[in-house]
Image (cartoon, helix red, strand yellow):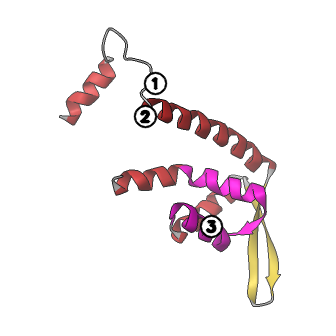
Amino acid sequence: MPEAIEIQLKKGVLTLCVLALLNRHDSYAYEIASTLSDAIDMGEGTIYPLMRRMHSDGQVETYLVESPSGPSRKYYRLTDAGRRALDAQTTEWRAFARAVESVLDGAAPAASPAGPTEDVTAERGAEQ
């Protein structure tokens, strides 16, 4: 897969993955980053801005937990808004994944007999 496409796919599902992880248990950013690094090879640097945005959007809230081996850790937990976002994004993801699988399996609906729409025709012209 070309790297640019892979990166965009990962960015597109990052929030969903974080919401899913936090739905299982509260966590701190480094732990989330490590899990996603192992699972989908996502870099640690992308997690911190995402966590700040999710916090400002009201999807997560934070609390501090003292650590015996260093400074206190900021833990994140889902809010009700975060759970609603998880439900909505999960539904959207599953519908999208089914549609992609349908196309890959050759079961996608055939193009209309009239041919491509003007928008698609214009897009194709721009690509050439």
- Find disc 1 in the rendering and name its residue: 107
Residue at image coords 20%, 28%: 125
Looking at marks 1 and 3 on the same chain, the residue that comes earlier in the sequence is marked by 3
Q: Position of residue 21 (x, y in %)?
A: 70, 58
Kind of residue at badge 1: Ala
Classed neighbour count for the residue bearing mark 1: other residues with Cα under 10 Å, few (<14), some (14–19), many (≥20): few
Residue at image coords 37%, 17%: 111
- Find disc 2 in the rendering and name its residue: 104
Instruction: Give residue 37's quadrant in the image.
Output: bottom right
Q: Secondary structure at mark 1?
A: loop
Q: Position of residue 112 (x, y in %)?
A: 37, 12
Compared with 112, 46 (above or below) is below
On whether residue 24 falls in the magenta region, the answer is yes
Kind of residue at badge 2: Leu
Distance Cα–Cα, label 3 vs label 2:
29 Å
Q: Secondary structure at mark 2?
A: helix
**125 on left or right of 52:** left
Classed neighbour count for the residue bearing mark 3: other residues with Cα under 10 Å, few (<14), some (14–19), many (≥20): some
